[in-house]
Amino acid sequence: MSQKFKVLLRSFIIGIVAFFSLLLVYFLLVGLVESWKHAQELFLTDAFFIGTISLGFGIQVGLYSYIKQLQKIIAARNITAAAVSGTGTSTISMVACCLHHVGDVLPLIGLSGAVLFFEQYRYLLMWFGIIINTVGILMIIRLIAKNRLWPKQVFNIC
């Protein structure tokens, strides 16, 4: 198995694991705060948003993993900082999308206004998460293109 194939396969697997991990976080967050049945119903209702945000997160983590592995191969140390900023935004947007489910707890600690905010702007927050995902993916792809880190170019010089 070539080094090029190993790097691409490892990045793909890491992206898939990140995708399913974020879905698991969603189900745990909603399931533990509300109920497992509610988590399933809400997932079916918001499948487009949840799936798109999770997919964006998986793609970003996979691309970041690709860059990180290349860093070891060609010592491209100047590219990691920008990639890190993109992957963090997906997690934040997914958590923001689920925050309105903490509504059972917030009134108990005096934050009932926050419940209304998150419920009222839930879809707006999820669209924002999708936009942030897209921007993060484009930033990482731009970084790859700018530094000529496409598989064919990188592995021809290694």
Image (cartoon, grey):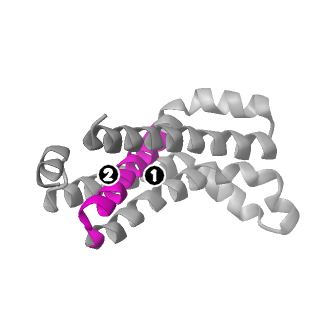
Q: Count residues near mark 2 (Cα–Cα under 10 Å), then give few for <14, some for 14-19, many for 20+.
A: many
- Label 1 secondary element: helix
53 in the magenta segment: yes
Per the rendering, the mark at residue 12 is none
Quarter of the image for the C terminus: give it: bottom left
Residue to which mark 1 is pinned: 129
For the stretch drawn in magenta, what is the main secondary structure? helix
- Image x and y of residue 136, in percent: 34, 56
> Residue, x 76% and y 53% (percent of image)?
103
State which region is magenta.
52-77
* Residue annotated with mark 2: 137
- Nearest the eye: 12 or 128: 12
Relative to 131, 90 lies left or right: right
Based on the picture, tell me whether residue 122 belongs to the magenta stretch: no
x and y, in percent, of residue 153 in the image: 12, 50
**Front tag of 2 and 1:** 2
